Amino acid sequence: MARIKMAYIGGGSSRAAGTMASFLWHGPEFAGSEVVLIDKDPERLETVLKIARKLAAEGGDGITVTATTDQRAGLADVDAALTSYRPGNFAARALDERIPIKHGVIGQETQGPGGFFMALRSINDMRTITDDLQAVAPDAVIFNYTNPVNIVSQAVADHTPVPIYSMCEGPIVFPPVVLRAAGLDPERAKVTMAGVNHNCWSYEHLYDGEDVMPLLDAAWERRKDDPTLDPNSKRALHLAVVMRSIPSDYFNYYYFRNEVFRDQQAAPRTRSEVIMDAVPGYWDHYREQAESSHPHLDPARSRGGIHELELAIDVMSAYYNDTGARLPVNLPNADNALPGFDAETVVEVYCSVDRKGCHIEPQQPLPLAVRGITRQLADYQMLAAKAAWEGTRADAIRALVANPLVPDLSIAENLYDEMAAAHAAYLPERLLQ
């Protein structure tokens, strides 16, 4: 088992209690390790620290937990940095969702203009993290969960020597959306997806060892007029049947954009506004458990449940324990392993993970019908990463107009200026001129 020193940046976030519960559930894999929680909010950091210390004591694996608001001090001599933070919190996300709708564009956390501005904010903070790591922990590895994970990873990979692996459960959770919509058992399927984060497709899709597409065709004929089928699942099933590939359901924003946009216009609240209503209740629960002698997190009162960021912890465990586990990871497309994508592009693919790193397993090309939009999103990803790391307003406009959800240059310019002004507190001056 691996004994490491890990810093968790975002250790006072609403997901942090569940993340620490997850890490400590894996305690035997990290016996004797040290965790340093880092966050800008001292009160919430203290609450998570109390819960984590009590859970660690109950686990009996000798894991110690400390906390600090001093990022550089907290990163000193770490082996791993787990990054999961949200500059501007959910109020910033609400702006990412609301402002684009005013301009006739879908507002979303990781896609389109909203995702672009989240990337600008996230990467502005990530620059300080990589600077600090190079100064005080030059051998550390970043295990990233900060969205948009693909653009964040692209920026770090392109501009620093710091190793970064980013994780998202998408390739694991997207296929069951389509399979369940078709009335199929996900446990009987083997689906392999690849692409860029939140925008991947299947190039292998088997059910009991046979091509699943005939079963999806039959299910679509049965269910296309079924009013009980969830709209998101229905769109994903429809898209799979037409494109002959199981999609990330984020592609609903691109292939059903008019329907989705109308839904957003009609909704009284955005997703972030719904979450903001729930967040105070999460913290009430966390404070209660922090004072309990035996903390017990209620999934219904915890942000995201009680096993948060578990894929990142699985990758971390495979890396430091040298297991060779097969897991989906976002990393540069070394040796053009995913055909049709440049070697420097950060792609989301299945890898074997051991002490030497994440090794991309042999890949098949994406189906031609879906390769174009995925490549366009990959090119946008690279432009966005460059603009966020070192660019100006002009670089940012070029990146934004390259996103398929942005219909023309005038809209891109107007959207950019309004959103940059709204998020000015979290952006570098070079992006505001």
Image (spheres, grey):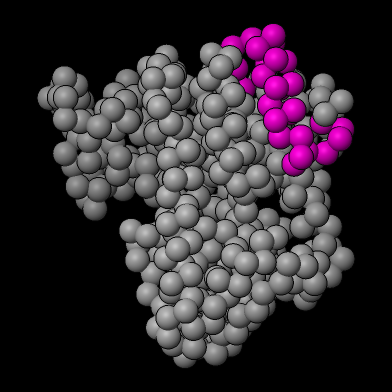
Q: Which residues are magenta?
A: 403-431
- Which residue is located at x 46 percent, y 32 percent? 270
Seen in the picture, residue 106 relative to 62 is either above or below; the reply is: above
84 with respect to 134 (left or right)? left
Hey, which residue is sitting farthest left in the picture? Answer: 222
| Dominant secondary structure of the residues highlighted in magenta in the image | helix
67 with respect to 18 (left or right)? right
Residue 416 is one of the magenta-drawn residues = yes
314 with respect to 260 (left or right)? right
State the image coordinates of residue 46 (x, y, percent, origin top left).
61, 72
Return the residue nearer the eye: 213 or 236.
Answer: 236
State the image coordinates of residue 248 (x, y, percent, origin top left).
42, 35
Return the residue nearer the eye: 383 or 269.
Answer: 269
- Which residue is located at x 60 percent, y 84 percent? 64
Return the residue nearer the eye: 323 or 156.
Answer: 156
Seen in the picture, residue 262 relative to 422 is either above or below; the reply is: above
Residue 140 is one of the magenta-drawn residues = no
- Which residue is located at x 22 percent, y 35 percent? 181
Seen in the picture, residue 375 relative to 324 is either above or below; the reply is: above
- Which residue is located at x 56 percent, y 44 percent? 90
State the image coordinates of residue 40 (x, y, percent, origin top left).
70, 60
**Image quadrant where one finds the C terminus:** top right
State the image coordinates of residue 352 (x, y, percent, origin top left).
52, 60
Q: Tag count in the figure?
A: 0
- Whether residue 36 is visible here, answered yes or no, is yes
- Whether residue 382 is visible here, answered yes or no, is no
Q: Quadrant of residue 304?
A: bottom left
